[in-house]
Image: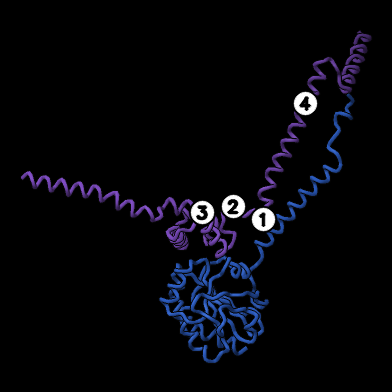
Amino acid sequence: MKSRSFLLFIVVFALTLLGPVEAFAQGSAPSDDDVNRIAKELYCPVCENTPLDVCPTQACAEWREQIRLMLAEGKTDAEIKQYFVDYYGARVLAEPPRQGFNWLAYLVPPVLIAFGIFVLARTLKGWAKHDITESHGGESEPQAEVDEYVRRLEEELHKRQ
Amino acid sequence: MSLQQQKRGVSLWVQMLIWLSITGLLVLVGLGLWKAQRPMVSVGSPAPDFNLTLFEGYNFDGAPSVKLSDLRGRLVVINFWASWCKPCEQEAAVLETAWRLYQPGGEVVFLGIAWTDTEPKSKAFLKRFDITYPNGPDLGTRISQLYNRNLGVPETYFIGRDGLLKHIQIGPFSSVSQLQALIDRLLAE
């Protein structure tokens, strides 16, 4: 009985050791997360507005399989993306490559934002100056004209009384 | 401070620069839209030229690639397909049978172009259906963009001996006789 328990212990112990060994062996196979890390940066031309990692079509499933295959071959993320660009064109990339007219996509928004900030700052500065002038008792010309008109109107009213 | 001084605006050259930039941007956007909305290559117009690099194991007159303009004087049947496309599977046997009928005469050339397909799957498809006519991938999707086709697969384009586009078949051919009738009509023109 004692020896049977010991044997069972040995078997269970061996199995617990085997588990991690198997997991380690499978560790070299790319996981779905590994595949999706690259896939989310790609778009297949069949379904243009859906990123590859969530695209449900058969075409996209095959593309993801291709990524898995290349990862298993030891290819880097950059090499895989370059393969897809060579094979299907730059339009598969989520971010257009920084070259030629594509630079507009990167340069125009910051330039427009900077211009907007400049206009806003200038306008705010103008308003601030205007407020300071008024608080120091200065009167702008139209205000002076209105006051003069009021003074004359009151004068006329007094005369009639 | 006078009112005129307060209203002093940005200098003229800055205004010009801003307007030029806006105009330039609008022109670029307009060009992009025009390019995107261009109609598909139409029947009767010259077929855009392209160079098709063939899959390993395929050749055309011994060369690993084929240029459309080099085929002037022959009727060219260009079929866009993909391994993930079910109708393409139905059509594969029809195209291969027709190719074997016309190949000895040399008047008709069939070209298969794998569209947005992965290379291993394309090769497996060709092997599965025993496709013998020249086939290659649409590298960079350059050929499909030249033909401005976005409708899916299969699609078949017929280029006449004169280099003009004669017919576009959207969807699969259902029978060899259907394809044969069309080819014979175009050969008779």
**Looking at the image, is mark 3 or mark 1 earlier in the sequence?**
3
Residue on which the image places disc 4: A127
Give the percent coordinates (x, y) of residue A87: 55, 65
Looking at numbered disc 3 in the image, what kind of residue is underneath it?
Pro
Task: For mark 4, name the chain.
Answer: A
Q: Are labels 3 and 1 assigned to the same chain? A: yes
Q: Determine the CA span between mark 2 and mark 1.
A: 11 Å
> In whole angstroms, how far apart are the C-alphas of marks 1 and 4?
42 Å
Chain B: its colour in the image is blue
**Amino acid identity at mark 1:** Gln
In this figure, which colouring scheme has been used for the structure? by chain
Question: Quick check: marks 3 and 4 in contact, CB under 8 Å?
Answer: no
Give how far apart the Cα atoms at labels 2 and 4 are: 41 Å
Badge 3 is on which residue? A51
Q: Residue at x 68, y 52 (%)?
A: A103
Of all chains, the one bearing label 2 is: A
